Amino acid sequence: MAIIKKFRIKTFKKEKPKIDLKNISLSFNKRQILDDISLKIQEGEICGILGPNGVGKSTLFNIIIGLLKPDFGKIFINSSDVTNIPINRRALEFGVCIVPQSGGIFSELTCEENLKSIAEIILKNKNERVFNVEKMISKFQLESVKNIKGKHLSGGQKKRVCIAMALISNPKIILMDEPFQGLDLMTTRELQETIVNLQTEDNSRCCIISDHAARDLLAISDKAIVIANKKIIAQGSPSELIINKNAKSLYFGDSFKIN
Ligand SMILES: Nc1ncnc2c1ncn2[C@@H]1O[C@H](COP(=O)(O)OP(=O)(O)OP(=O)(O)O)[C@@H](O)[C@H]1O
Ligand SMILES: [Mg+2]
């Protein structure tokens, strides 16, 4: 297991679901993508979502944030049924945020303006806005590019701006869709630390992360699931998951190890 795991303080002994997905199904143009997905994510938990390309991980994220409505099933946040609550209210009232798989920043705005634009929507207090923008620029090492337009940032820099934009609002439910994609090794390690620290700072948060960098993801996950053939085919702690027969045959293969 990676060193990062040593930083983690696990304190969720009691069951307190932050998110409760009940029997979620969704089809696009009669092609079923997700079939009867049920999943609970506890307060304080980091849940990794794995699965082959095109299996529906981003789709599931879009259902959780309220961009897509499931054909069947319900979504509960803090025990409230939010299935019919729109995306903006899920963000403002329930603290849901997402780092999308691609895009997510305004290409004509500078890095700093991108951060300010989100801060102005979310944070009422001007001093808090200025403080948080500066904090994020420093945390994600964006000083040297803060005046560069989004369209001129490198792939990894864009990703860092996106992550900073998501975290600036002090979110309670953090979804990250392939956050490690395009990040260099040190930034990957720093992001792992940031995610773990977010949880230890506020134990009522939860974090759901999908990424194909399975080792980096499992190193910080409390539990993880594998989606394949429209369903959750395996779930458990990282060490349970990698020896799960279904997970091996449909996702990890035979030779995958995490240390
Ligand atoms: N709006 C849409 N209309 C039709 N089909 C869609 C739509 N959005 C996604 N799909 C299809 O749904 C399936 C799941 O897509 P999704 O993006 O959720 O996969 P994923 O698991 O995130 O894959 P990846 O690992 O490549 O990111 C894919 O077959 C995709 O083509
Ligand atoms: Mg995806």
Image (tube, rainbow, N blue to C red):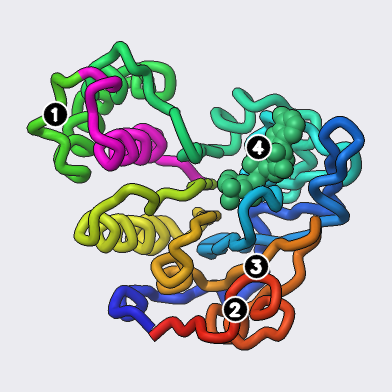
In terms of sequence position, does the residue under pointer 3 or pointer 1 come before the other?
Answer: 1
Asked if the residue under mark 1 is in contact with the one under mark 2, i.e. CB atoms within 8 Å, the reply is no
Of the residues shown, which amino acid type is indicated by label 4?
Asn
Residue ID at (30%, 34%) = 158
The residue to which callout 4 is attached is: 62
Q: Is residue 174 among the parts visible in the rendering? A: no
Q: Which quarter of the rendering shows the N terminus? A: bottom left
N-terminal of the pair, mark 2 or mark 1, is 1
Which residue shows up at 43% across the image and 82% down it? 258
- Distance from the alpha carbon under mark 4 to that under mark 1: 30 Å
Q: Which region is colored magenta?
A: 149-172
Tag nearer the camera, 3 or 2: 2
Q: Is residue 96 left or right of residue 250?
A: left
Nearest to N terminus: mark 4 or mark 1: 4
Disc 3 crowd, CA 10 A, few/some/many (<14, 14-19, 20+) = many
Q: CA distance from mark 3 to mark 4?
A: 17 Å
Residue tagged 1: 145
Which quadrant does the C terminus fall into? bottom left
Q: Which residue is mark 3?
A: 225
Q: Secondary structure at mark 2?
A: loop
Magenta stretch holds residue 155: yes
Left/right placement of residue 17 relative to residue 152 reads right
Looking at the image, how many numbered discs can be counted on the residues?
4
